[in-house]
Image (spheres, rainbow, N blue to C red):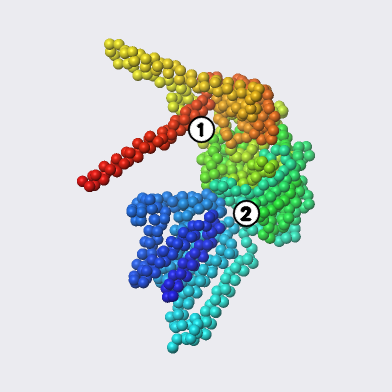
Amino acid sequence: MSGRVRLALGSMAATLCAGCALLPLVDPITWLFQAAFLLAMVAAVGALARRVPLARPLTVAVQALATVLLLTVVFARDHAIAGLLPGPDTVTTLAGLAQDGVRDVGRYAIPAPVTPGIRLLLVSGVLLIGLIVDALAVTYRSAAPAGLPLLALYSVAAGLSQGGAGWLSFLVAAAGYLLLLLAEGRDRLSQWGRVFGGPPASGGTDARGGRVRIRTGRRIGVLSLGIALLVPAALPSLSGGLLGPAAGGTGPGGGGGTISAVNPLVSLQDSLNQPENREVLNYRTTAADTREMYLRIVALDQFDGTAWKPSERTVTDVPAELPRPPGLSSDVSVTRINTSFSTAPWYAQNWLPLPYPADKVDIPGRWRFEPEGRTLVGDRGQNTHGLQYQVESLQVRPTAHQLASAPPPPAALRSEYTKVPDSLPAIVRTTARQVTRGARTAYDEAVKLQDWFALYGGFSYNTEVRAGSGTEAIARFLADKEGFCVHFSFSMAAMARTLGIPARVAVGFTPGTRQPDGTTSVGLKDAHAWPELYFQGVGWTRFEPTPSRGTVPDYAYPDAAQPTGPGGPDRAPAPSTMPSAGPPTAPSCGPGERRKGPGCVAVASIPPATPPGDGPAPWTLALGALAALLVVALPAVPLLWRARVRTRRLAGGGPGADPTAHTLAVWQELLDTGWDHGIVPDESLTPRTAAARIIRTGNLPPEAADAARRIATAVEQALYAPQPAPAAGLAADVRQVHAGLRDGAPRALRLRARFAPRSAARLRWAAAARWSALRLRCRHSRPVAAARRRAAALRTASRRRGERA
């Protein structure tokens, strides 16, 4: 085998070994086989160009051209000239795929799916590095500098990996580079004669001396690899991500040490954007209601204006019984529950998910306890990989009155947890004061902040928005009003601190999804962040400002049993009175409507005037009569349709009827009734939360409010109870809620709800769906398809006749 061929194989092997560091980043790994095949073709083109021989720059140019052609054939063949040559459409296609790949890299967590864009980035990156390595090591006969592009490829993998690339990836990449150096050394020595064994060539170097040189080089390579692997292992390492693999970040064992954690923005957003909701853990609990089973991983209590992060805290051994939560008095109702957890084998991070506040934790392995945040962190590499543990915790159930009447927090705690930097934009403090204007207590301010984010502020939930950082991140979020749980929790906690309310941010998981076997499954898409505010007598208290995520706790609603007065909770303000950090958005009017003040009104179509003549023809009179009938009847269609639907829904509870179907029909009628009165349904809300929203926004009297709660309870029974009990009187409850909404609404809204109900949009949606289905059937029907084939055949025959002519 010639020296150049040996070097070419060595450079290809070194590139593929370095590319193996990218394997943990994506799944599946089939892209590497494709990259290896294309890399072999590029190396073969280089070998042929050097055999001609071509000048060195021309050899590299020919290989680069071959790389472009190969990428065109593999990724943009349909847009290439003759399926091979790249043109303007090819460049556009490849550029679009590259942009998609960059977006997907920032969107998915590790291991990411091999989307077309990510595949293009991986394959083209390996080909580019392989081309540079081949040019340096083979064409220009200088293998040592070829380690730089190999290092760049490995560094990309290490930078994207959570916690850095593993030692095995480094070993494979380094072995590839040493293989390349060995091939070059062998090629150089071979130029002096047969030095690798056998009888020495006449006048050549002694074979024994050649073997000694090669053996010495191998020993040096092995020693270098060993030092490169052992030295970093002896040095302290950084902790890993909160939601991904991580190494231990604790100090020395024995009751001391400190912990720290990285910012959770990237890993949390990646988890929410995973295409597959992989199970992180599952649990079985004695809690009757799992909606409050939020699983905290870590508390972020340090706010520097750029980001929230956990403070460095002292850790101790895990006590047999954890200390009582700070600030929790004996007057607050608590329920003690037991929960058994089991984590997935692939889920390995050093923070333990726990319900808050945990009282006892029975767990194997090396774990340490951080008292301030009441979290457990792994020691000396301990993580949650395939773990089973038991937790005894408290479900704290304060009332709105207890929170509203909470005394001021201790001065030291208030001083630490209300710190905001001077660099915080003034709009954050100003908006917080506007939103909470009129609030009498810290609880009132907290509820108003929560409701403004979740209901009235015009915010939308979107996990594609960049998490952002810097002092202007919160101000930008308040202006754009679009983000995910990190934006909402960070912003509410910061605004609460500007109001003097102690606040921090918790990161973890929402309660998950109940399974048929009685367990609850928590997946990647349950990753969440939420604010915790401190109230003396209750302690750290969860709020939920993120729309369509999690559940709003019961204590975050005004206590109906408590009279409104000084020190009592405020009802959430109506949407029209809530301040907004941006200009209000006017509602869009539908077809056949025009804007009138803040709303939309129907506009009747006027038939065109009949031109003068001797007299209208009979068919003209018929068309005129039909048009007049339509003008009169069309505005009444929503009213008639709504009345028919209401009657059908409420009349379905007779003997022999399905009680579950009747309950769900009544629930749909309640939502549409609220929609008619301006309360747009939100499918992401639980029945209880949706009913509370209707009660609060519609300003329902106590009797109507109780009726709405009864309907929500019946819906929960129908959806989740093993054997739901039939509920009686639901139709009467809906009529009572309807009466409460009607009596509390302004006259214009009452007329709109009666004669132009907003829920009549369902009629338009149903008609559009039927029309689309009809068009689809017509398009794919046999006669239409046959006609299209005949037309195509005629066009082909006509074109061929023209060519012969």
- In the image, farthest residue toward the bottom: 203
Note whether residue 669 is visible.
yes
Element on which disc 1 rests: loop
Tally of numbered tags: 2
Residue drawn 59% across the image and 24% down it: 649
Residue 232 x, y percent position in the rendering: 61, 66
Q: Nearer the viewer, residue 140 or 281?
A: 281
Point out the image quarter for the N terminus: bottom left
Disc 2 residue type? Trp
Q: Position of residue 493 (x, y in %)?
A: 62, 43
Picture layout, residue 307 above or below residue 460: below
Between 488 and 95, the one nearer to me in the picture: 95
For mark 2, give the secondary structure.
loop
Q: CA distance from mark 2 to mark 1?
A: 46 Å
For the residue carrying disc 2, how many other residues have a C-alpha within 10 Å: few (<14), some (14-19), or many (20+)? some
Check disc 1 and report the residue beneath it. Answer: 584
- The answer to which quarter of the image holds residue 628 is top left
Q: Is residue 197 above or below residue 529?
A: below
Percent coordinates x, y for residue 168 in the rendering: 58, 64
Tell me which corner region of the image, top left, top right, bottom left or bottom right, holds residue 400: top right
Q: Amino acid at mark 1?
A: Pro
Q: Is residue 319 above or below residue 224?
A: above
Q: Is residue 95 above or below residue 514?
A: below
Question: On the picture, is 611 further left or further right than 171?
Answer: left
Determine which residue is flagged by label 2.
346
Query: Which marked residue is nearer to the observer: mark 2 or mark 1?
Result: 2
Query: Mark number for residue 801?
Result: none
| Of the image marks 2 and 1, the number of the one nearer the N terminus | 2
| Residue at the image position 49 percent from the left and 71 percent from the top | 180
- The residue lying furthest to the top in this view is 614
Which residue does the image show at 40% across and 36% down from the upper left?
Answer: 782
Q: Residue at x 38, y 34 (%)?
A: 783
